[in-house]
């Protein structure tokens, strides 16, 4: 039996007033930061994205942050080859 390696990716996304920014230094206008970790459970299964909300700008009210999430959605969405798990 041959064991095959599969890709794993980790990083972050920052929600800003103009949308999502991937990785790097957090933008000064960010309102939320989400860390992600992804890998398939096996080479034959769906890719699973785990998102953890790790920072929020408390000066921006939750209703305003929720409105931005509604407007821009999550940076990665589920599809037939990917599941997405959110932890707030």
Image (cartoon, rainbow, N blue to C red):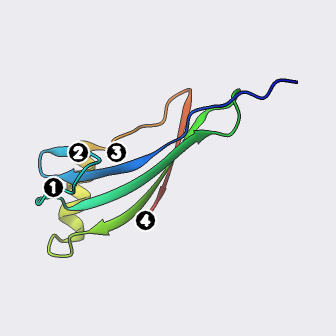
Q: Is residue 82 above or below residue 34?
A: above
Q: Are marks 2 and 1 in contact (CB under 8 Å)?
A: yes
Mark positioned earlier in the residue sequence (3 or 4): 3
Which residue lies at the image location 12% right of the left edge and 51% below the top edge? 17
Q: Nearer the viewer, residue 42 or 86?
A: 42
Question: Distance from label 2 to label 1 (Cα)?
Answer: 8 Å
Q: Is residue 29 above or below residue 78?
A: below
Which of discs 3 and 1 lies nearer the camera? The answer is: 1
Image mark for residue 74: 3
Which residue lies at the image location 17% right of the left edge and 58% below the top edge? 30
Q: Are marks 4 and 2 in contact (CB under 8 Å)?
A: no
Question: Distance from label 4 to label 1 (Cα)?
Answer: 20 Å
Mark positioned earlier in the residue sequence (3 or 1): 1
Disc 1 residue crowd, few under 14, some 14–19, many 20+, Cα 10 Å: few
Residue 87 in the image: state x and y as whole percent: 47, 61
Question: Distance from label 3 to label 4 (Cα)?
Answer: 13 Å
- Taking the image as shown, residue 54 lies to the left or right of residue 83, namely left
Question: Distance from label 4 to label 2 (Cα)?
Answer: 19 Å
Question: Distance from label 3 to label 1 (Cα)?
Answer: 17 Å
Image mark for residue 27: 1
- Pointer 4: what residue? 88
Image mark for residue 73: none
Image mark for residue 21: 2
Mark positioned earlier in the residue sequence (2 or 1): 2
Which of discs 4 and 2 lies nearer the camera? The answer is: 2
Q: Are marks 3 and 2 in contact (CB under 8 Å)?
A: no
Q: Nearer the viewer, residue 29 or 6?
A: 6
Circle 4 SS class: loop
Residue 29 occupies quadrant: bottom left
């Amino acid at each position: 039996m041959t064991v095959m390696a599969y890709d794993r990716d980790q990083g972050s996304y920052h929600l800003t007033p103009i949308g999502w920014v991937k990785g790097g230094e957090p933008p000064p206008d960010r309102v939320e930061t989400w860390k992600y970790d992804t890998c398939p459970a096996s080479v034959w299964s769906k890719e699973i994205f785990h998102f953890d909300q790790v920072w929020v700008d408390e000066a921006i009210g939750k209703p305003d942050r929720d409105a931005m999430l509604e407007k821009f959605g999550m940076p990665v969405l589920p599809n037939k080859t990917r599941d997405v798990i959110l932890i707030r």
